[in-house]
Amino acid sequence: MTTQNDYDKLVTEYRDLQLRVSRFSSIEQQLVNTRDQLDHELVLYKRLNKFNKDVLKNLSEVEFIELVAETIIDILEIEISVFYIEYVGEGKNSFIHVEGKNFDNSYLEMIAKDIKKIAVKSGDSIPEIFTKRIFENYESMNFYSDGISFHFFEKELGYFISLFGMVTSKKAPLYQRLDAKHETIFGIFGQQVQNLMANRKRSEKIEQQIQKISASEIELKKLSLIATKTKNGVIISDKEGRIEWINDSFTKSTGYTLAEVIGKKPKDFLQRKDTDSDVNTQLSEALSRKETIEVKIVNFTKEGLPYHNLIEIMPVFDDEGNHINFISLQKDITAETMFLQERNDFIARLGSLKFFYESILNHSPAKIAVFNPDYTLSYANEQLLLKDTIWIKSQGKSLEQIAQDNLSEKERLLNILNAIKTSVSENRLVQFEEIKKENDGNSRYVLNNVLPYFDDKEELKHIIVSGINVTDLKTIQNDVLNKNLELNKINGELDTFVYRVSHDLRAPLLSIKGILTLLFHSEQFNENVTEYLNLIQNSVLRLDETIQEILEYSRNARLEVKLETFNVEEMVHEIFADLKYTNPDNVDFSMNIQGSPILKSDKSRLNTVLKNIIGNSVKYKKSNSNDCFVTFSLKQLEKSIEIKVSDNGEGISSKSLPKIFEMFYRGTSTSVGTGLGLYITKEILNKLNGTIFVSSELGLGTTITINIPNE
């Protein structure tokens, strides 16, 4: 017989149960909201990805600007976007494009004026969220409640760009407030626009140059040769070799004016009886064949003075291939010839060292000098002699004396001397860098190496000093360092984002799972309540599985491969045991090991791979079959292991098979997985330099083959 106390107790327990169900419903709604938020952010990044694809099309500048403005609205989901560009030094005016709201021309002029003030005040390459307070400082902006902007100035290409996204006060309640996540995606988008705009401008300049070159090919050949060879004499003659034009450098070096030589052939007034006849023969034969030729010859000025001349003669053809002109470049190499003669005398004095040094050192890009044990100069290679003339007449002099003779270079020469002394006393290679200022104001970095040479009796014979220009290497190193720092920063931010989101999502899930476990072990509920709790538990488990797989993906991308030796067979036994516990349905697990089960690889990553693959075999077994099986086999190859996991489950359709490694791909709407498992498996195997192959037949089962290097 039921008493009043029993009845009151039942009522109290019923109310308590109702309260718990309400709480679970609230938590479930929070989970749904969180999932919707993640899905929404994924949509925004997909829109950003669509922009990357659309921008690759052949767009005009106006179409490009319109696409940027439309994408701002799409990725930020705001009311109005503005693309503002101001050209510098090109005679162009500012240009502004507004998307999302119609304005008349007078308002456009006013908003352009205030946007320029905001942009200049904000600085370069800074995504910044604006508030109503900031907008109130500008006349045309006072009816906006929220906004975000990104600015960058391309000094080299000559333009300033600002991107804006804004929401009016009137419609602000309909739009989401802009916050840090919008600043992040807008920063990424702004960097992309900056790079794309720079590439477009560079392409435009290249196209303009190509058009100029195509306008008059023959005339540009003449002008480009004259422009690049202005210090040399230039002769343009007709197809018979008669002079049509000479430049000022030719007149300056020979004394002949255009009026004196027009219509004549150069050999008629530049040569004498003792001119080399073999060279003349070479010239005549090349000109008759209409071939380019380069020769050295001794010519004579108008005053009859001889000079050494390096001549290069090139035939010029029109578009139809007709020979129309000759162009001759004439360089006075008298000083170089005399220099080479002095250099040859210098080398001859080196005696027995000639063959030792010339074959190696003269072909080196480095400046090389060899000093005697008393620190006097013994040898200098061509790079040093041609580019550092203080060494030409320094043979036999000590470094101290050379430094005294060249006060402007004294400090540098004494540094070399100190490095030589250190190298000799410690019998080792000494390296040091020096920075040189060029005439154009740029700095040049030179890496100097000092190495002593001792004979078999440990007597010092020579000290070799070399210097090589490493300016380009320094520039590349700095660029790589800056890029690495930038990439590390971005990767770190992404890792932090994934970890924080996953951690914040999983913490309440674990609490819910614990509460559900307690409920299932408490008093029995009626059938409906138990069913509802099972639905909640299944949803929690699926969401927890998704979060764990996101974490697995993040760990795989972030952490380096950690090699360790372990037993694969033991790992698979543990996976089988876990699956039998969590899936009590009848599944026959079997294992076939050929060779040693010992593997050296990344244990944690391989464990994740095998859990995903074996777990899928159990998850997608045939529901109406009592003889389900999963077979694991391992075979040791020469430098790797081969793993196969086979089952007789549902199988995969030929239509779905090519897509199973795509992120979030699920074969059907009823699939129980998250669509991340095989994607993460593929990414992990890429990290391990492994491969994966899937063969499957719908209704018959699936076999997955993995090959992993055995380190």
Image: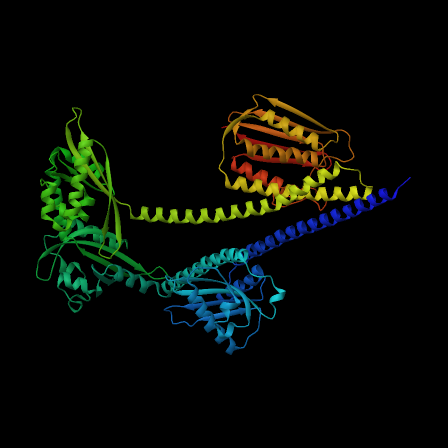
Q: Residue furthest bottom?
A: 106
Of residue 627 and residue 262, the one placed in the foreground of this image is 627
Of residue 36 and residue 222, the one placed in the foreground of this image is 36
Determine the image quadrant of residue 633: top right
Give the vertical position of 659 relative to 248 (above or below). above
- Report the residue at 20% width, 54% height from top: 311
Whether residue 279 sits left or right of residue 159 in the image: it is left
**Quarter of the image with the N terminus in it:** top right
Determine the image quadrant of residue 572: top right
Is residue 380 visible from the viewing direction of this image? no
Colour scheme in the image? Answer: rainbow
Of residue 157 and residue 338, the one placed in the foreground of this image is 157
- Report the residue at 52% width, 48% height from top: 494
Is residue 51 visible from the viewing direction of this image? yes
Give the vertical position of 384 relative to 580 (above or below). below
**Residue 425 appears at what percent x and percent y?**
17, 32
Determine the image quadrant of residue 459: top left
Whether residue 278 sits left or right of residue 78 in the image: it is left
Q: How many marks?
A: 0
**Residue 13 appears at what percent x and percent y?**
79, 44
Of residue 531 and residue 630, the one placed in the foreground of this image is 531
Whether residue 210 sits left or right of residue 626 in the image: it is left
Q: Residue furthest top?
A: 595
**Residue 294 appears at what percent x and percent y?**
23, 51
